[in-house]
């Protein structure tokens, strides 16, 4: 085992060399400014690397990640990221991205006790409680995927409800909120279609996306 992680420094030097070779001046240009169009709010899971899976370069995606892609109303970390993204960088899209087989969601579904993170996962348990009747109608083997999608829906709605996004919409700033789910098994993103570009679109988009989940999991 390497104690100095020299292999990572080696890979880093090689990556920087390749990047600069492909586009001379790449890093000096980024130094001047970042102009990403997207804010990605995803899970911390190492299997869901934000930039890589949408093939975007440094400077093109503003990223916030935590366990189970939660957007809690009082989380100053997420709120600060959202505010800077919307008001500073003027991103046009905020995308909440969950993923199948999410360990955080699994812990919430099965009441696993893991430690401090239990308190964080409580936010996902709130989602489970809110949709308990629906989840009871889903086949047990599909419940985890269904809760992953419901969690994306609720967290995307939380983004819409932040003062930052509400204020942006009130002053006519173009910012669209999305909810997607990433399949660990096939590497593909799927749009849950809770897409809202104005305050008025939030409730109908939420309802339509929820109906989509109900239909997909035969939970009517
Ligand atoms: Zn996860």
Image (cartoon, rainbow, N blue to C red):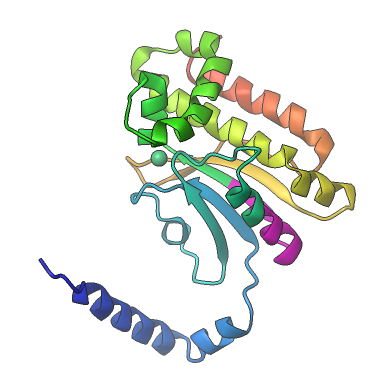
Quarter in which the N terminus is drawn:
bottom left
The residue depicted at 47 percent of the width and 86 percent of the height is 23
Tell me which residue sits at (37%, 27%) in the image.
107
Hey, which quadrant is residue 140 in on the image?
A: top left
Depicted 59 relative to depicted 137: above or below? below
Q: Which residue is depicted at the point 55% across and 35% down? A: 152
Residue 102 visible here: no
Ligand 1 image-quadrant field: top left
Give the camera-side residue of 185 and 33: 33
- Dividing the image into 4 quarters, which one contains the C terminus? top right
- Expressed as whole percent of the image width and height from the top left, the position of residue 126 reads 54, 22
Residue 8 spot, x, y in % from top left: 25, 73
Q: Which residues are magenta?
A: 82-95
- Magenta stretch holds residue 69: no
Q: What percent of the width, then of the height, locates residue 40?
A: 56, 53
Q: Say if the magenta span includes residue 89.
A: yes
31 lies above or below 3:
below
Q: Is residue 61 visible?
A: yes
**Position of 157 compared to 137: left or right?**
right
Q: In front: 107, or 18?
A: 107
């Amino acid at each position: 085992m390497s104690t100095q992680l020299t292999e990572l420094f080696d890979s880093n030097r090689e990556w920087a060399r390749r990047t600069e070779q492909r586009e001379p001046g790449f890093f000096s240009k980024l130094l001047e400014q970042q102009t990403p169009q997207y804010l990605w709010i995803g899970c911390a899971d190492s299997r869901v690397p934000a930039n890589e899976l949408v093939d975007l370069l440094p400077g093109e995606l503003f990223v916030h990640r935590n366990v189970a892609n939660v957007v809690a109303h009082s989380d100053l970390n997420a709120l600060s990221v959202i505010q800077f993204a919307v008001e500073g960088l003027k991103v046009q899209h905020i995308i909440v991205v969950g993923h199948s087989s999410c360990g955080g969601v699994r812990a919430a579904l099965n009441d696993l006790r893991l430690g401090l993170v239990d308190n964080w996962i409580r936010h996902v348990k709130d989602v489970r409680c809110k949709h308990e009747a629906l989840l009871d109608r889903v086949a047990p083997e599909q419940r985890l995927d269904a809760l992953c999608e419901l969690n994306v829906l609720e967290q995307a709605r939380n983004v819409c409800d932040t003062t930052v996004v509400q204020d942006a919409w009130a002053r006519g700033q173009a910012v669209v909120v999305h909810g997607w789910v990433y399949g660990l098994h096939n590497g593909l993103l799927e749009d849950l279609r809770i897409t809202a570009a104005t305050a008025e679109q939030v409730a109908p988009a939420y309802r339509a996306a929820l109906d989509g989940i109900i239909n997909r999991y035969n939970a009517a």
